[in-house]
Structure formats: C-alpha cells, structure tokens
Image (cartoon, rainbow, N blue to C red):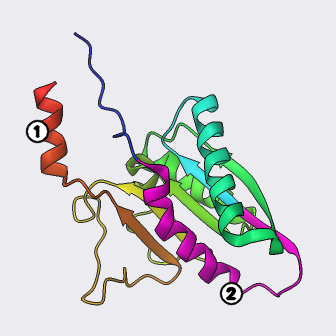
Amino acid sequence: ANRHLTMPKISIPAYLILVFFLIFFTLSTHSSALEDLRIGVMTDIEDQLVASQLTDSISQEIRRTVGSDYILVISEVITAIRTPEASSNAYQQLENSSPDLILVLGPKSLSGIATQSVFKIPTIAVWILDGKLQSLSRNESGATGKANFTYIQSSTPLRQSVYRFKEL
C-alpha cells in the first residue's frame, strides 16, 4: 500500500491559544485606532482549498479574540512549501510585503528559516514536531533567543508519533 506521512490531526484552537497570546503582543505595538492587522501565512499544505479553510479558521478565531478594534487581513498565503530554498524564498516574499505578523505552518515551511538569526517581522512557527531536530532551541526561560521569533511544538512527542505511524 502507498502510505504518505501526513500532518497529525490537530485541534486548531489548542494551537491557536498561544498564537493569539502572541498576536496580542503584536497588537500592543499598534495604536488604539481602528486599523488593519495584516498576517502573512506560509504553509506545507498543498491543497488550496484546505489552506483556505485553515486560514479562514485562523481568521475567525483571531477576530473573536481581538474583537472589533482591528480589521484582520490575511495579506498573503504561500502554499506547498517543500524545500528549504522554497521556505527561505517564501519568507523573504512575505517579509517584503510587510505584514504585522508571519505564521509559519508546518515543518517544511520552517526548514529554510530555522537557522535564521534575524527576524524583522514577528514570526510564529506552528506544528513543530521536535524543536531540537528542526534546528530550534529554547533557553532556560523558554524563549528562543531570537528577537521576533517563537514556535509552538506539538504536544505529542515525535517518538510516540513514529510508533503510532508504524502501527498503521
């Protein structure tokens, strides 16, 4: 049988709790007047419909969280990232469009930026399987040590995910 490793089913609200907290931090740099909150997204997801549904879900959750003080705009979504070079290029493209926040969804999307030391725009990487294996680290206080960058690691240990996959 032809089996493909897919992203684990993830409860979007569970991952987004930290994302929303970090978005509030980003919002604190904005004035109190009604204005756009521009978010750029890069993802491993290939299917445009699935990527669109995901960004719609993220948009709805963020709107519920930040209320009506901001107009949420998903400024750009780059999909089907498969190589470190594509990841790096996608990040540069998003960075050049000057969003207020960049969401990096998936381990392949992270591959080209994991070792980057400078992040000009606040960046949150989600669906990280194992920070150490993916060239990420945290210091004793839990911070990445990189200004404008953080990540959310999967709550299921990689070893456990591999064992579950083998059982299929």
Along the line of sight, which residue is nearer the eye, 17 or 145? 17
Residue 57 coordinates in the image, percent (x, y): 62, 47
Mark 2 is surrounded, within 10 Å at the Cα level, by few (under 14), some (14 to 19) or many (20 or more) other residues, namely: few
Q: In the image, is residue 145 above or below residue 166? A: below
Q: Quadrant of the N terminus?
A: top left
What segment is highlighted magenta in the picture? 11-38
Q: Which mark is residue 163?
A: 1
Q: Quadrant of residue 5?
A: top left
Residue 109 coordinates in the image, percent (x, y): 46, 50
Residue 108 coordinates in the image, percent (x, y): 41, 47
Residue at the spot 48% in from the left edge and 75% down from the top edge: 149
Q: Amino acid at mark 2?
A: Ser
Q: Quadrant of residue 37?
A: bottom right
Q: Which mark is residue 28?
A: 2
Tag 1–tag 2 contact (CB < 8 Å): no
State left or right for residue 12 relative to residue 165: right
Residue at the spot 25% in from the left edge and 58% down from the top edge: 130
CA–CA distance in space, label 1 to label 2: 42 Å
